[in-house]
Image (tube, grey):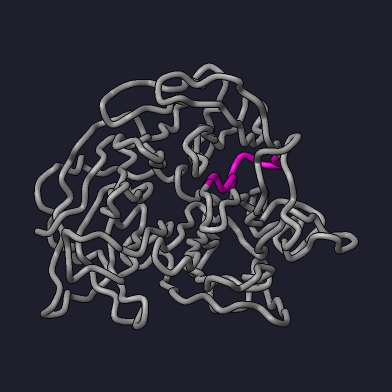
Amino acid sequence: MRPVVALIALAALTACSPAGPSAAPAPSTAAPTGSPSESSGELRFREVARLERPVALAVREGDERLYVAEQGGKLRTSDGATVIDLSGEVSTGNEQGLLGVAFHPTGRWLYLDWTDAQGRTHVTEWAYDGTRATARRDVLTQEQPYANHNGGQLAFGPDGHLYVALGDGGSAGDPRGNGQNLGTLLGKILRIDPRGRPYKIPDDNPFAGREGARPEIWAYGLRNPWRFTFDRESGDLWIGDVGQNEREEVNRQPTGSGGGENYGWNLREGDRPYRDGEGRDLVEPVIVYPLGEGGNCSVIAGHVYRGRQIPWLRGHFLYGDFCAGWVRAAPVDDLKAAAVVGQVEQLSSFGEGPDGELYALSLQGPLYRIEPA
């Protein structure tokens, strides 16, 4: 049975050489096969900053800087400034710490997802003027029964609401059945308006007003949705859900779906039943790949590229694997045509700049800008 070590925990178990700022090397024999088409090519991952265990990136309206969350507790900018320091408050487990960052669409507030010394998840808000973060308050807290599968992603959707990822609570196999339990926030993606006391529930949330269900829930049946992103052009939601024993998966929720999708965990892992689980109306993943093959261990969902610097990459979804290190690009209308386009050791996350250009983060420290090779 696979050890319960999704994403960040694997950093302590994987010996990798540092990745450099030069052009991405060709995929090794341990990486998935596939080569770019004639209209595409490999990408260059150019180092633009070096941080301490970077795990998430966000941008702020009217601000050209990149904001990077370091797992140890600091929110830093690409020019080296420290905006917030929670290093004395965050828990230090392998899958804990500061895990996510997002800015309100107006840029007036920033939000961090982090775990405290007792392992509880916090979504915390600060007022922010571009220089100082003040008026701190907790928007949401969640008890965590185990130290792993905390999720951690925060993002504002095209609708202006805040989406929050929470894993199933940890251990192995979802022993408490949280993924399929609508009475808990664990194993879900939430949708809230954070500008409330402490937050508001959008009236059109799929389970608002349903007896026995938490109205914050937007989607469920997730094991550890470490990273999700919104396509800035279509509004589609792409969710990378880290697998248990056999399969890594990416799910795609089309814009305008209304929410309420059940992505299957723990009845199903990827495209296969888990422990003979059965369920109705489960949404099939759009990308699945085998866990363990070629060193695969944890899927890292990226963005659909909408920038201008790499014309052939437009309309491709980027994703990668933390342990194997490969990065793939797949046309959104033909996801089976994915090709390996580069390599990032200990890939922890992707990010999107204000101009639509993409970045890759390595837990080893580098922040890379993705460019044509």
Q: Residue furthest right?
A: 211
Viewer can see residue 100: no
Residue numbers of the magenta segment: 143-154
Q: Which quadrant, please, contains the C terminus?
A: bottom left
Q: Quadrant of residue 135?
A: top right
The residue sitting at 40% across, 40% down in the picture is: 61
Near-viewer residue (97 or 260): 260
x then y, percent, for residue 199: 72, 40
x then y, percent, for residue 92: 52, 28
Give the vertical position of 127 relative to 337 (above or below).
above
x then y, percent, for residue 21: 14, 42
The residue sitting at 54% across, 35% down in the picture is: 111
Q: Does residue 221 appear left or right of residue 95 in this picture?
A: right
Q: Quadrant of residue 65?
A: top left
Q: Quadrant of residue 267?
A: bottom right
Q: Does residue 188 appear left or right of residue 365 in this picture?
A: right
x then y, percent, for residue 159: 57, 57
Q: Is residue 319 magenta?
A: no
The residue sitting at 65% across, 41% down in the picture is: 194
Near-viewer residue (117 or 172): 117
Near-viewer residue (130 or 243): 130
Viewer can see residue 56: yes
The residue sitting at 77% across, 52% down in the picture is: 184
Q: Which quadrant, please, contains the N terminus?
A: bottom right
The kind of secondary structure the magenta stretch mainly shows is: loop
